[in-house]
Image (spheres, rainbow, N blue to C red):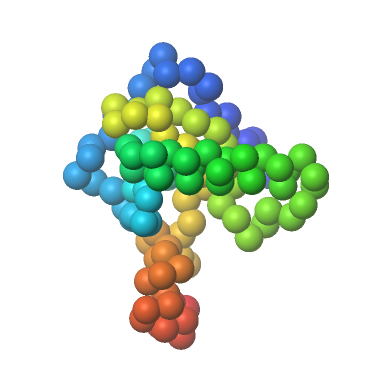
């Protein structure tokens, strides 16, 4: 088992990201590759009160599940936050398909059909 990644908890070493290069997007966030760490991604909430509030809610929920010992095996593992050139980002395991490409969002799979996602 490989050692867990620990994201730096300060903004002293910014991770350089390009706003034009997200690998995915949700309704209130964009997701970027973590440079040099292909197993991870950085999720950036939209810079409005809704995106930031949603990210804080998700972080609180994830930490609560961990404290209670609840299974998080169906969730991308949260590793903490990191400073980026685009603002504070949240580091997660990158979810990938068997061919190595980034997995589609739940909405994409529902729109195109679950059978197409496999």
* In this view, 45 is above or below 80: below
> Looking at this view, is 98 or 88 the one in front?
88
Quadrant where the image shows the N terminus: top right
Of all residues shown, which one is farthest toward the left?
20
Where is residue 19, by image quadrant? top left
- Image spot of residue 8 (x, y percent): 51, 23
Number of numbered discs: 0
For the point 71% across and 42% down, the residue is 64
Percent of width and height locating residue 67: 77, 40
Q: Residue at x 67, y 40 (%)?
A: 63
Residue 92 seen by the camera? yes
- Which residue occupies the extreme top position in the image? 12
In the rendered image, residue 41, in percent from the top left (x then y), is placed at 43, 44
**Along the viewing direction, whichever of 55 and 40 lies nearer the viewer:** 55
Residue positioned most to the front: 49
- Residue at image position (74%, 55%) is 71
Q: Give the residue drawn at x 37%, y 79%.
A: 111
Would residue 44 be seen by someone viewing this image from the given angle? no
Q: Position of residue 95 (x, y in %)?
A: 48, 56
Q: Is residue 51 above or below residue 118?
A: above
* Horizontal side of residue 61 vs 104, given as left or right: right
Q: Quadrant of residue 108?
A: bottom left
Q: In the shown orientation, is residue 114 left or right of residue 79?
A: left
């Amino acid at each position: 088992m490989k050692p867990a990644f620990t994201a730096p908890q300060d903004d002293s070493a910014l991770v350089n990201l390009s706003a034009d290069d997200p690998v995915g997007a949700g309704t209130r966030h964009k997701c970027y590759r973590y440079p040099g760490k292909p197993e991870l991604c950085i999720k950036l909430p939209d810079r409005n009160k809704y995106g930031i509030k949603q990210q804080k809610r998700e972080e609180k929920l994830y930490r609560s599940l961990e404290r209670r010992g609840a299974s998080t095996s169906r969730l991308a593992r949260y590793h903490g936050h990191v400073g980026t050139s685009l603002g504070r980002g949240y580091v997660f395991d990158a979810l990938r398909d068997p061919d190595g490409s980034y997995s589609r969002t739940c909405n994409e799979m529902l729109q195109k059909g679950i059978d197409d996602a496999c």
